Amino acid sequence: MFHPLVFDNIRVVLEGGVYDRDFEGAITITDRSDVMDMATFQRLFQIDFELAAATNRERAVKARMQLRTGLADIAAEQLEQPLTDHIGCTICIHFFTVIQEVTDEVQRIAVLLNDIWGQRPYITQTVSVRLEEKRIEWPPQSYLNQITLDFHRKIDEGNIDDLRDLIDHTVQSLASLQAIRDLQK
């Protein structure tokens, strides 16, 4: 009989929890993908959403929850062989927003997210700017900030009960980041 992977079990619960928040009217799901990379034999599931109450879609902060697993974990689980220390998958959360004052805003965002998440995930911020051909404006008026929360550990079915809190913290973070974005001109 077919036995679903740890990845599949977690994906179903994660996806269901995010869709529940969409049905409640807290968020709007904007994209999702479930990918099997045959070249590297990896699985990736990601679901994107924004606050349902965001009045201006162009100014909406976006969230992406990303679940992935790789060959070693899949093979160890299927072969029932200890090919890796701990069989499971990883989860990362990304937020995409626009900032104007880089130094001040990245510090404010780090403090805000550490308060919400209790200093648990490792937070990185990647600030970039898009320069259109023949329209180079420097310094730019705004920058794209991709904020990544990485827990640097694998999760398995024993963590399924934690997924609701993870989703709640993600929605709370999204609302706080949207409040910062709404204060900008």
Image (cartoon, grey):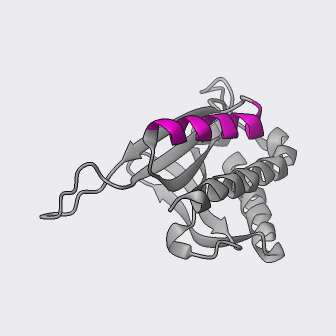
Reply above or below: 121 against 18. above
Residue 104 lies in the magenta stretch: yes
Reply above or below: 93 against 115. below
Give the position of the N terminus as an image quadrant.
bottom right
Q: Is residue 18 visible?
A: yes
Reply above or below: 62 against 162. below
What residue is drawn where x is 46% and y is 36%? 103
**Where residue 22 appears, x then y in whole percent?**
75, 72
Q: Nearer the viewer, residue 60 or 81?
A: 60
**Where residue 159 appears, x then y in whole percent?**
81, 41
Q: Quadrant of residue 28?
A: bottom right
Name the side, left or right, on which 132 lies relative to 1.
left
Label count reads: 0
Reply above or below: 172 against 123. below
Q: Which residues are magenta?
A: 103-118
* Identity of the residue furthest to the front in this view: 185
What residue is drawn where x is 71% and y is 58%? 175
Q: Nearer the viewer, residue 159 or 164?
A: 164
**Where residue 123 appears, x then y in whole percent?**
58, 34
Main secondary-structure element of the magenta-colored stretch: helix
Residue 43 lies in the magenta stretch: no
Q: Is residue 4 visible?
A: no
What residue is drawn where x is 45% and y is 45%? 101
What residue is drawn where x is 61% and y is 26%? 84
